Amino acid sequence: MPILKILTQPNPILRKKSAEINPAAIKSRELKSLASSMVKTMIKADGVGLAAPQIGKNIRLIVINSKDGVFCLVNPKFIKKSWARELGQEGCLSIPGVFGEVKRHKKISLAYYNQEGKKVKLTAEGMMARVIQHEIDHLDGILFIDKAVKIEKNDRQ
């Protein structure tokens, strides 16, 4: 499981909408290997989430590092988003040294497939909801800087 190269802005792959993964391919060795490499890459880069477009693959695959451990979301889809939103600071492995205030839904519900190919429903709030929304934006070719109200650069990177 190699460490993968994280693409950075302005790579055009980051701006493409990602394709759904065929449910028959979810349990494939290739996808499991890719997800494992993404997890390793995310942890090495000190990230809390990583979407497949960030490593050059325009497929709907995300890995998240939560307080309960690492998990993988295949073909995530929002079921519900709270009316209430909150502003919070975000950064991105694909835009090093840049941070911004982004308004996100406080609570979300989504459905996705896990690595065993089972459909899972998840409700998240707070930081976890923010990370999931940020990563799903990547699958749609959207970067946090597109939504940020205030952007700061940290040149100490």
Image (cartoon, rainbow, N blue to C red):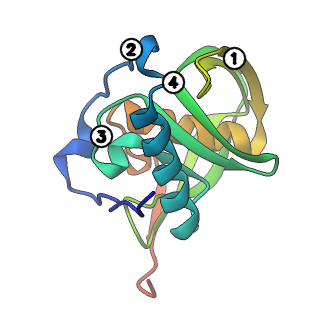
Q: Which mark is residue 57?
A: 3
- Mark 2 highlights which residue? 22
Tell me which label, 4 or 2, sits earlier in the chain.
Answer: 2
The secondary structure type at the circle numbered 2 is loop
Relative horizontal placement of residue 102, taking residue 16 as reference (left or right): right
Relative horizontal placement of residue 125, taking residue 24 as reference (left or right): right
Mark 2, mark 3: which one is toward the viewer? Answer: 2
Q: Residues within 10 Å of mark 2 (few under 14, many from 20)?
A: few
| Gap between marks 1 and 2 measured at Cα | 16 Å
| Gap between marks 4 and 1 measured at Cα | 15 Å
| Gap between marks 3 and 4 measured at Cα | 17 Å
Tell me which label, 4 or 1, sits earlier in the chain.
Answer: 4
Residue 5, image x, y percentages = 32, 62
Mark 4, mark 2: which one is toward the viewer? Answer: 4
Q: Quadrant of the N terminus?
A: bottom left
Q: Furthest residue to the front?
A: 29
Placement of 125 over or under 9, stated as above or below: above
Tell me which label, 3 or 4, sits earlier in the chain.
Answer: 4
- Specify the amino acid type for callout 3: Lys
- Mark 1 highlights which residue? 120
- Specify the amino acid type for callout 2: Asn
Q: Furthest residue to the bottom?
A: 156
Q: Is residue 93 visible?
A: yes
Q: Which mark is residue 27?
A: 4
Mark 1, mark 2: which one is toward the viewer? Answer: 2
